[in-house]
Amino acid sequence: MDFISILSIFVLACFVGYYVVWSVTPALHTPLMSVTNAISSVIVVGALIAAAAAGSATSKWLGLLGVVLASINIFGGFAVTARMLAMYKKRER
Amino acid sequence: MAADHTPAWVLIAYLIAGICFIVALRGLSSPESARRGNRAGMLGMGIAVATTLAIHDIASIVEIAIAIVLGGAIGLVTARKIQMTAMPQLVAAFHSLVGMAAVLVGAAAFLNPGAFGIVDSAGDILTVSRVELGLGVAIGAITFSGSVIAFLKLNGNMSGKPILLPMRHVINLGTLAAILGLIGYFTIDQSPWVFFTVAALSFAIGFLLIIPIGGADMPVVISMLNSYSGWAAAAMGFTLHNSAMIITGALVGSSGAILSYIMCRAMNRSFISVIAGGFGGDAVAAAGGAEAIDRPYKRGSAEDAAFLMAQADQVVIVPGYGMAVSQAQHALREMGDQLKAKGVRVKYAIHPVAGRMPGHMNVLLAEANVPYDEVFELEDINSEFAQTDVAFVIGANDVTNPAAKTDKTSPIYGMPVLDVEKARTVLFVKRSMGGVGYAGVDNELFYRDNTMMLLADAKKMVEEIVKALG
């Protein structure tokens, strides 16, 4: 992909983000923060590439540490979001 | 460029992961669809990780597996054990991890650029990648150190009071200019010192930016750091030409930015003034507090409160940070149940900045099994106070202060507030008369004829009311 295609994806995704986030109900703003946290850990992709590559030992260990940190976030973020969302209940009639 | 050799199915897989993340956020428009959305998010993450592992020659699969299991276990245990009242700290801690991960990935890419496919034929890092790397590491480092400070303040390891350095605006702007200048210089000189100085200065400015911001502005800070963690992921996505990372980064970045905007609007403060910091300092508190001490007010007991509420047709409960501090949400739900059993309509009114993070009160009430359709946002319930018999304010103060509507000299003038004074009777649960809200201003509602002060710890007071109602 060249720079311009990447930039296009980025700009369009910003617009998608803008409209999607405004539709989030204020009652769910805390789960919104925890789930955005979990998904921003997709940065684990970069950490995996560094950890998997041969060539630089330092780079590999930095990558592995990155994988640990991002995994804490991924598992912790999705789990705590699920825990919160399970608490939201409607009135029993 | 390695990205040119990437098979099409990989690009599509990352795109699908990105779409899963959009679906995850879209789900949050209602609690039912949110649970499905969360699962879509997990699926997207699984796709992204599996794709990455599938297309690389992996020299260290065992180490990687250990890293994932170790991180995953820490994450799951934390998520299970954490108290709901500690959610703001947890989110700040998680943000710091995303920031640090971005820095680590950036450093790894700098040290081994060949693995990331960002070198030209001469073995130098591509110019555009240098800018992306520099920005990614800078934003990641700011996110990390800023979130660590936010965590320490929210967790009470550090005073929530703003810490004001002399000349802080000059120092901050100077540091920021140095970072941007060095990133520019990085395009012509890729020596390690340039790269690592950018990282070091960025760690420093993240720290400097957050220390002057007071505890009450934390909802803005935490949303802002949320936004930064997204931009850091996006910058790394540019470096790696990875659409999943770019889409996610853009989503998270806009999400945090919108939340910051909503929080600022709810306090009627500009984003710049929050970032500049210093709000809620001692100077303001001294100005407002002096004359307040001798004014007469009515003090009530739990029995008085129980009697008043049992007679009411409608009671509106207004929770604030004080409810979170004393963990009163469960007792409050019990009180609500008893009132409902006596035929009283019970509703909850939430101000956008009640608590320490967006949606903080809603989560605590949900934890206590309060049905979410009894919980209303400011604009939906404000017109109802005139038909309300009792407004029960627990641990909130400034968000009810009528001075925001009438007193142009008040620091909170113009902030949207809950019109509790329109209710027939206002009950204030408050620890003592001495404490003022975060803005350091007195609330004249305390001294009105139709106000009754219930001075005690929030949880104890509610428990006593429950006993009196029984």
Image (cartoon, coloured by chain):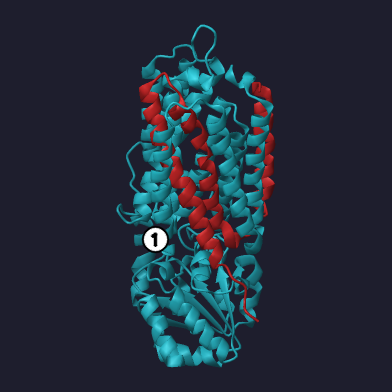
Chain colours: A red, B cyan
Q: Is there any visible trace of residue B173 in the rendered image?
A: no
**Residue farthest to the top?**
B122
At 58% from the left and 19% from the top, the residue drawn is B2
State whether residue B335 is above or below residue A29.
Answer: below
Q: Position of residue A76 (x, y in %)?
A: 46, 51
Is A2 rendered above or below residue B454? above
Towards the viewer: A64 or B178? A64
- Amino acid of disc 1: Lys
Q: Position of residue B456 (x, y in %)?
A: 35, 79
In the image: residue B27, left or right of residue B160: right
In terms of depth relative to the viewer, which is nearer, B409 or B19? B19
Quadrant where the N terminus of chain B sits is top right
Q: State which chain disc 1 sits on.
A: B
> As rendered, which of B50 and A59 lies closer to the eye?
B50
Q: Residue at x 45, y 76 (%)?
A: B330
For label 1, count other residues whose C-alpha is less than 10 Å away and answer few (under 14), some (14-19) or many (20+).
few
Instruction: Identify the residue under disc 1.
Output: B81
Tell me: residue B355, above or below residue B258.
below
Specify the quadrant that holds the C terminus of chain B: bottom left
Residue at 36% over, 23% down: A57
Left or right of B187, for residue A93: right
Picture quadrant of residue A56: top left
Which quadrant would residue B433 be assigned to in this image? bottom left
Q: Position of residue B398 (x, y in %)?
A: 47, 65
User: Taking B280 as reference, is B387 left or right?
Assistant: right
Q: Secondary structure at mark 1?
A: helix
Q: Residue at x 62, y 63 (%)?
A: B31
Q: Is residue B9 visible?
A: yes
Name the image quarter holding residue B68: top left
Residue B184 picture location, percent across and down: 49, 18
